Structures are given as structure tokens and as C-alpha cells.
């Protein structure tokens, strides 16, 4: 393949990969937020690092941002807070770039040591992002996206509304996406199975109010991929 063909192929891959970022900018333009406009370069660079490390993590993060926004919309979250949600959802697993592929791709059950390493990714994410001043508002969201509503999560065992609202929203979106996609250690389950599981753990693992909003949205927008198009303006970007 010539250098020019390689360049064209790379540009095509990049433009389809980052189409969702254009959608996010489109949404944020309505919120008077300049977060993505001003800091889009650094956000995109971090996403490229994530994609180069592990394509699956990158796609997971982009889908989670797609599921989180409709929840915020349904909850009537102040639009000036959407930028924090979008950027933290996009980068919530950035800390996994420091975890070995052997663990990330392991097909069998993780050992206790491997599981401890995985659990460090929320702290690693904060470490990666904290030197950049603009990311300060998203650091608590990154750190606490694996806390459980009943205090049984990690890393700080926060409970209930001690957990930042954006992190509680991302938890629901994260769990949904984790269940409806294939993982090295198990196959995806169906949309209805994932929704049933979210309903089952609402109030223990997940915030019950956030879960209700998600489940209400998901009733009207099956199959799951249509959730990505929930925000009305997004369709015009396709
Ligand atoms: Fe995570």
C-alpha cells in the first residue's frame, strides 16, 4: 500500500471513529459550553491513545457517553452540566491504558491480584487527567464511577448521594453497555436481559432514580443502539 493510500485509510478510520465527537460537539453547542470546543484537542488525543491501546475500551467509552446523555436529558439535568457528563463518560476508563493487555484480554476468571489491578483504573484515570487544569471538574466522576449506591463499590465506598450524580449516571450506562457487548470472559446478553438486571440492582448497586430514567427511555427505544439517537438533534448529524 502506498503512503498516500495509507494516509487516506487512516483518515477514513479516524473520521468514522470520531464521528460521535462531532455529535457531542453539536449537543454541547446548545449548552453554551466551550469545554469540548476549547479542549477538544486534548480530549481527542486521549481518545486516540485509548483506541490505540485497546479499541474495545475506546468503543465502550463512546457508547457509554451515548447512553449517558439521554439519561441526563430525561432527568432534566441542567444543560450547563452536560459537558462534564460527556467528557467524563468519554474518558471514564482512560486509566485502563496502564493495565496490561494480558489482563484486559484474559478469557478466564481473573485472579484476586488481577482484579485488584483492574480496580486501580479509576485512580489511574485521575492521575492521568489531574495535571490538566480543565479536567478538574471531571476528576470526582472518573474516580467514583465504580462506587455502588449501597456503599459496596470502589475505591472509597461512597454511598447514595455522596457519589457524584454524573458518576451515578455513568454507572448505569456503563453496566448496560458491559452487559450487551461481548467480553473476553462471556457473551453479550440481550437488551431485555440487561434491563432486567439493571432493574434488579436499582437501589443496591445503582441509583434507583437514574435506573428508572434509563429503563423508561429503553422501553421506547429498542433495540439498544437506537438509544444513541435519542437526543433529537443527533439524527440530523447522521
Ligand atoms: Fe471503569
Image (spheres, rainbow, N blue to C red):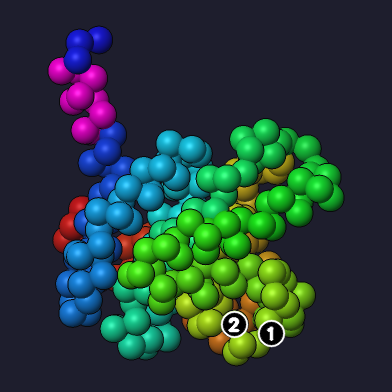
Q: Quadrant of the N terminus?
A: top left
- Where disc 2 sits, the SS reads loop
Describe the element under mark 1 as helix, strand or loop: loop
Q: Could you say which is closer to the camera, residue 84 or residue 202?
A: 84
The answer to whether any part of residue 28 appears in the image is: yes
Magenta residues, as a range?
A: 4-12
Q: Is mark 2 within 8 Å of ligand 1?
A: no
- Residue nearest the viewer, comparing 26 with 125: 125
- Horizontal and vertical percent for residue 103? 69, 39
* Residue found at the far top of this picture: 1
The crowding category of the residue bearing disc 2, from other C-alpha atoms within 10 Å (few below 14, some 14 to 19, many at least 20), is many
At 22% from the left and 76% from the top, the residue drawn is: 33
Residue 186, given in percent of the width and then of the height, sits at 70, 43
Q: Where does residue 67 sit, x and y in percent of width and height?
A: 43, 65
- Does the segment drawn in magenta span residue 117? no
- Residue, disc 2: 163
Position above or below: 137 against 44? below
Give the quarter of the image for residue 195.
bottom right
Q: Which mark is residue 234?
A: none
Residue 177 lies, with reference to residue 103, above or below; the image says below
Q: Is residue 177 visible?
A: no
Residue at 32% from the left image edge and 62% from the top image edge: 229
Q: What residue sits 72% from the left and 77% below the top?
A: 157
Where residue 28 sits, quadrant-wise, is bottom left
Report whether the residue tagged 1 is closer than 8 Å to ligand 1.
no
* Picture quadrant where residue 133 is located: bottom left
Quickly name the residue at label 1.
Answer: 159
Which class describes the residues within 10 Å of circle 1: few (<14), some (14-19), or many (20+)?
some
What is the residue that sits farthest to the front in this orientation?
131
Q: Position of residue 144 (x, y in %)?
A: 59, 72
Q: Magenta residues: mostly which secondary structure?
A: helix
Say whether marks 2 and 1 touch (CB < 8 Å).
yes
Amino acid at each position: 500500500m502506498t503512503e498516500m493510500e495509507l494516509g487516506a485509510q487512516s483518515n477514513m478510520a479516524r473520521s468514522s471513529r470520531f464521528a460521535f465527537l462531532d455529535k457531542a460537539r453539536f449537543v454541547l453547542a446548545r449548552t453554551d459550553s466551550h469545554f469540548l470546543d476549547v479542549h477538544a484537542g486534548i480530549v481527542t488525543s486521549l481518545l486516540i491513545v485509548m483506541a490505540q491501546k485497546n479499541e474495545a475500551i475506546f468503543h465502550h467509552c463512546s457508547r457509554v457517553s451515548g447512553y449517558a446523555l439521554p439519561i441526563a436529558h430525561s432527568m432534566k439535568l441542567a444543560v450547563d452540566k452536560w459537558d462534564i457528563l460527556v467528557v467524563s463518560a468519554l474518558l471514564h476508563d482512560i486509566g485502563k491504558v496502564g493495565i496490561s493487555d494480558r489482563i484486559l484480554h484474559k478469557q478466564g476468571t481473573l485472579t484476586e491480584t488481577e482484579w485488584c489491578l483492574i480496580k486501580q483504573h479509576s485512580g489511574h484515570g485521575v492521575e492521568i487527567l489531574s495535571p490538566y487544569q480543565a479536567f478538574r471538574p471531571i476528576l470526582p466522576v472518573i474516580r467514583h464511577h465504580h462506587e455502588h449506591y449501597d456503599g459496596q463499590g470502589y475505591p472509597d465506598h461512597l454511598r447514595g448521594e455522596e457519589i457524584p450524580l454524573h458518576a451515578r449516571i455513568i454507572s448505569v450506562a456503563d453496566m448496560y453497555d458491559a452487559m450487551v457487548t461481548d467480553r473476553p470472559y462471556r457473551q453479550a446478553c440481550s437488551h431485555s436481559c440487561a434491563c432486567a438486571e439493571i432493574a434488579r440492582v436499582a437501589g443496591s448497586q445503582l441509583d434507583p432514580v437514574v435506573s428508572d430514567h434509563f429503563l423508561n427511555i429503553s422501553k421506547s427505544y429498542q433495540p439498544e443502539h437506537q438509544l444513541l439517537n435519542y437526543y433529537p438533534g443527533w439524527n440530523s448529524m447522521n
